[in-house]
Image (cartoon, helix red, strand yellow):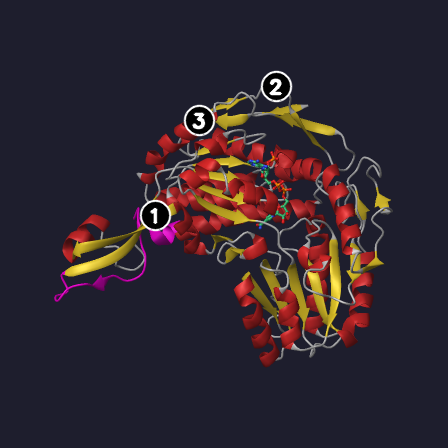
Amino acid sequence: MIELDSYVFGSWVKGEGKKSVLVNPTNGEPVATASTEGLDFAKVMSFARAAGAGLRSRTFRERGEMLRAMSRSLHAHRDELIGLAIVNGGNTRGDAKFDIDGASGTLAAYADLAAELGDARILPDGDGVALGRSARLFGMHVLVPREGVAVHINAFNFPAWGLAEKAAVAILAGVPVVTKPATSTALVSHRIVKLFVDAAILPTGALSFLAGSAGSLLDHVTGQDVLAFTGSSDTGVLLRSGKSALAHSVRVNVEADSLNAAVLGPDVDDGSDVMNLFIGDVARDMTQKTGQKCTAIRRVYVPSEKVDAVLDRMKERLAAVKVGDPSREDVTMGPLATPSQKRDVRAGIARLESCATRVFGDPDRPELLGGDPEKGAFIPPVLLLCQQPSAGDAVHSFEVFGPVATVVPYDGTAGQAAELVRAGLGGLVSSVYSDDKTFVRDVVLGIAPFHGRVTIGSSKVAAQALPPGMVLPQLVHGGPGRAGGGEELGGRRGLSFYMQRVALQGDRALLEAITGSPTAKGQ
Ligand code: NAP
């Protein structure tokens, strides 16, 4: 069995003491162990912090070249990584590609941005402004890299993309990274970091990696460090309120739970392109990565008179899903990532049944194509119907992190649709499917303050629409309230989390000499 080591102080170090065991969720067999016990976490942070100078001395273009090399390295080892994701994550090949190609794609997108930013090391933030009687006395804002460490703590569902999307932005900003994947699925992340280290892509210390618990790492964050966390709300609250984080005003970004919604407009006819798009998006989100996507649609709002038609279409789609051993080509949905997720998802479905009725799928009796029915973490797709929705019921307040969604009828008005979506109290992404401009405008503007992203599916874009569950490097990812209040990616916007915005005022010529004329666009 593989013993995962951590990459710290520029070398691979094995943990001591009792190890966490990573399992294959298809059969419950152990595949690796991990431990960070015995690591000197203060030294992990100080070593990484010292490496920042090496990144900051490079230009955006040079940092982008590193990101390009990281992206290529992932692509070159794609098949190997897919194999590991099948074994340790229960991913089908398609699921694994979604994670791994998402990782290499995001690194490549930030490499492209780096080329645009060019040979600068700092970024202008908006236009400068004349402050005095003449144009000489001038003010401007610039972003400079923070001189600390970017601590990245990730969830179990995207061991490749989670690592890469955060690291791409931090490294481009000039900030070294200490990354910690969720222990249960760390095999893929471990291999990725090994690839980067073996290829000597980054300066030593620019990327450290912890295989196992975060230990006392967060006791050593200080004022120039930042913490970006993805995971459950409960852990988010804990980390946000850590003593050192609070004492040093550490910047914290939290990406947490989300009850993402899809709204079908009253104008959408059965059999239309928009209806097909809607059904396809909901079915994909329920089953891709076995529903373990933070962006997956959990609530499906349908005008009352269309509910029967939608349920028929959904049942037809879900009946075609083949659950089982994800290494088999005929399997389209693998197990959940861990046995404990299976317990949680079963309990979560029972909780949803307090206000909804199960209309498809029996969580206790999945029909399997291979895999161990007892030791494997299998759950079939489960669809529920909530006839009498109310804010605060389980459908509107509880995320079941698996292949589970609930159809909720509404009266066909934009007002009620928006009100119900808003009852999720903050989400990463929700989507509206309609060609009715007034309906779309009223729903979109009604739910926008509660979301990081809203997608609109209409007939004009149905053929080229990107699924709402796909996070794009160009657009922000995050959301208010329940979703953690965070914001990542969004192209250049993502850099500002890792950089200090500072206002400079004085003689314009001097300011431009200091900053390399950052008032000029694109510097
Ligand atoms: P989790 O239990 O909160 O764990 C997330 C990460 O936090 C793991 O790396 C975990 O490490 C670490 N962690 C736990 N306790 C910690 C502590 N006291 N100090 C430092 N680190 C600690 O969440 P999860 O079960 O992995 O992920 C599922 C949740 O993540 C879902 O609710 C989902 O909605 C959310 N999620 C959100 C997004 C988003 O972008 N918004 C994306 C994906 C997932 P160990 O594994 O070592 O315990």
In which of the image's four quarters is ligand 1 placed?
A: top right
Disc 1 from disc 2: Cα separation = 40 Å
Cβ of disc 3 within 8 Å of ligand 1?
no
Q: Residues within 10 Å of mark 2 (few under 14, many from 20)?
A: few
Image position of 429 with respect to 13: above or below: below
Image position of 446 with respect to 486: above or below: below
Q: Is residue 98 magenta?
A: no
The N terminus, quarter of image = top right
Q: Name the element at disc 3.
A: helix
- The residue depicted at 78 percent of the width and 76 percent of the height is 305
Give the x, y percent position of residue 229.
53, 43
- The residue depicted at 72 percent of the width and 40 percent of the height is 90
Asked if disc 3 and disc 2 are in contact, CB closer than 8 Å, the reply is no
Q: Amino acid at mark 3?
A: Ala
Q: Residues within 10 Å of mark 3 (few under 14, many from 20)?
A: some
Q: Which residues are magenta?
A: 114-136
Q: Name the element at disc 1.
A: strand
Residue under pointer 1: 500
Give the x, y percent position of residue 489.
48, 52
Q: Amino acid at mark 2?
A: Gly
